[in-house]
Image (cartoon, rainbow, N blue to C red):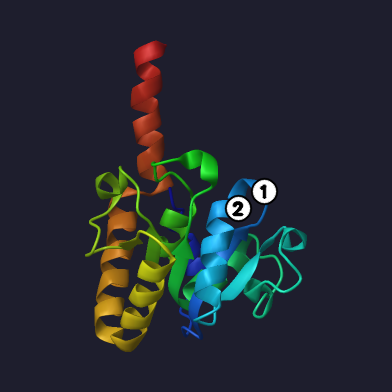
Amino acid sequence: GFESRILDKIGKNDRIYDVGFIGSFSPHHNKGTKLLEKVASKIPLHIWGQGINYLSPVSPLRKNYHGEAWGLQMYKILAETKIIINRHIDVAENYANNMRLYESTGMGAMLITDKKDNLNDLFKVGQEIISYENAMDLTKKIEYYLKHDEKRRTIAKAGQKRTLCKHTYKIRMKELITILSKYL
């Protein structure tokens, strides 16, 4: 879910970064890290995250590495970025289930995430978020949406609207109460 009060705390920001990634690097993220490295060899990616020591010293992800980002600083970066790349940890298999889906869209960035079986249950793919299948597909989509500002902004606004209407913590807590009530 997303905590919508964060929008008031962060305020309006210029989108100064074209493409960003905020996340972790570890042996559990190998597949996603390799994908990001392929993309970063063609497109400048701004990177924030922990576990940089797991990257090769010559990894293209190190070129625009800005350190770790947590809490309000992370949300400010999301608000300052046009396109946020998301990738799930290897153990997620074919299911979209991480926080970045909601944090990115909630802050109004256009989200491009790895294709998952349940993604259309969460967002309208192609209208509210974009999905990719591999590094080449991701690279092409980033290039396209950086050249088509209005389409990118339209998708970002629709993604934010979906998150604020369907994926807030207030909504999640109501869902949780319904689930727990069945067992109490």
Foreground pick, 93 / 173: 93
Three-letter amino acid code of the residue under disc 2: Asn
User: In the figure, 166 relative to 37: above or below?
Assistant: above
Residue 67 left/right relative to 128? right
Screen quadrant of the C terminus: top left
Residue 34: name its quadrant: bottom right
Residue 143: which numbered mark, if any? none
User: In the figure, 103 relative to 141: above or below?
Assistant: above
How many marks can you see? 2
Residue 118: name its quadrant: top left
Provide the secondary structure element on which disc 2 rests.
Answer: helix
Residue 47: name its quadrant: bottom right
> Could one spot residue 108 in this view of the protein?
no
> Could one spot residue 35 in this view of the protein?
yes
Q: Residue at x 48, y 77 (%)?
A: 19
Foreground pick, 137 / 109: 137
Asked whether disc 2 touches disc 1, contact meaning CB atoms under 8 Å apart, the reply is: yes
User: In the figure, 94 relative to 184: above or below?
Assistant: below
Residue 174 percent location from the top left of the image: 35, 34
Three-letter amino acid code of the residue under disc 1: Pro
Residue at image mark 2 = 30
Residue neighbourhood size for the residue with mark 2, other residues' Cα within 10 Å, grouped as few (<14), some (14–19), many (≥20) = some
Residue 151 percent location from the top left of the image: 24, 79
Provide the secondary structure element on which disc 1 rests.
Answer: helix
Residue at image mark 1 = 27
How far apart are the two marked residues, 2 and 1, measured between alpha carbons?
Answer: 5 Å
Residue neighbourhood size for the residue with mark 1, other residues' Cα within 10 Å, grouped as few (<14), some (14–19), many (≥20) = few
